[in-house]
Image (tube, rainbow, N blue to C red):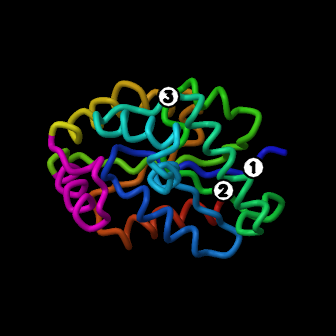
Amino acid sequence: MKYRTILLFGAPGAGKGTQGRILGTIPNFFHCACGDVFRNLSIEGPVGLTFVEYSSRGELVPDEPTIELWRQSIAANTATGRFRPKLDTLVLDGIPRNVPQAEMLKDTLNVFAIFYLRSTNSQSLVQRIQRRAIRENRLDDASLKVIRRRLKTYEEETKPVLHYYGRNLVHNINADQIPAKVLVDILRHVVKV
């Protein structure tokens, strides 16, 4: 079965997690943030160690462990009834992170909309990430060098995912607005699809 899926897309700090958490509170929407799945791992295990190794440098975790961990998380949420594939729309944030991951998930995801949260202010993104590092105790967001590497990785590896799915699915959303206005713009499109 392919999951009916919305992708929240954008650079680190664009507000994908904020919007995903809000959408996830609406009945029949299930939010899954791949970064949260990784951060909840025990760092003593092999996947946890791999996550720390890559994220501390601002790099993407290799595709195979990322997809395997994501599949395990979805299976666990399905088994507990939190995600009901026949009823719920899956709201993904942080996956697929590159074209190879999109290819690996093509038999699993039925992507019908991509909300591209675009920010024209890179300094604003950096400041959001730094605030998040303190507020959420996210060590992977603490270093300015790592933040700049993450933004570069996004441009080089993640942004091409938009072209993979095609422009017909993409809805451009101004991420420089306050979160409530961003949500209104997303919901305006959600009710149409």
Q: Callout 2: helix, strand or loop?
A: strand
Answer whether labels 2 and 3 touch (C-beta < 8 Å): no
Where's the N terminus, which quadrant?
top right
On the image, the x and y values in percent for residue 55 come to 35, 39
- Which comes before the other along the chain, label 1 or label 2? 1
Dot 3 or dot 1, earlier in sequence: 1
The amino acid sitting under disc 2 is: Leu
Q: Is residue 153 magenta?
A: no
Mark 1 → mark 2, Cα distance in angstroms: 7 Å
Question: Which amino acid does the dot numbered 1 rest on?
Answer: Tyr
Judged by depth in the image, the label closer to the viewer, 2 or 3, is: 3
The crowd level at tag 1 (other Cα within 10 Å; few <14, some 14-19, many 20+) is: some
Q: Which residues are magenta?
A: 124-144
Query: Does any portion of residue 115 appear in the rendered image?
Result: no
The type of residue carrying mark 3 is Pro
Please tell me which residue is depicted at 33% across the width and 30% down the height of the picture: 153
Q: Main secondary structure of the magenta part?
A: helix
Q: Nearer the viewer, residue 14 or 94?
A: 94
In this picture, residue 43 sits left or right of residue 149 = right
The image shows residue 78, relative to residue 97, as above or below, that is: below
The residue wearing badge 1 is: 3
Q: Quadrant of residue 164?
A: top right
Q: Which residue is mark 3?
A: 62
- Say if the magenta span includes residue 131: yes
Are the residues tagged 1 and 2 within 8 Å (C-beta)?
yes
Q: Is residue 123 left or right of residue 22?
A: left
Q: Regarding mark 1 in the picture, which secondary structure is present there?
A: strand
User: Viewed as shown, does residue 73 lie left or right of 179?
Assistant: right
Which residue is at a point 49% across and 49% down the rendered structure image? 38
Residue wearing tag 2: 90
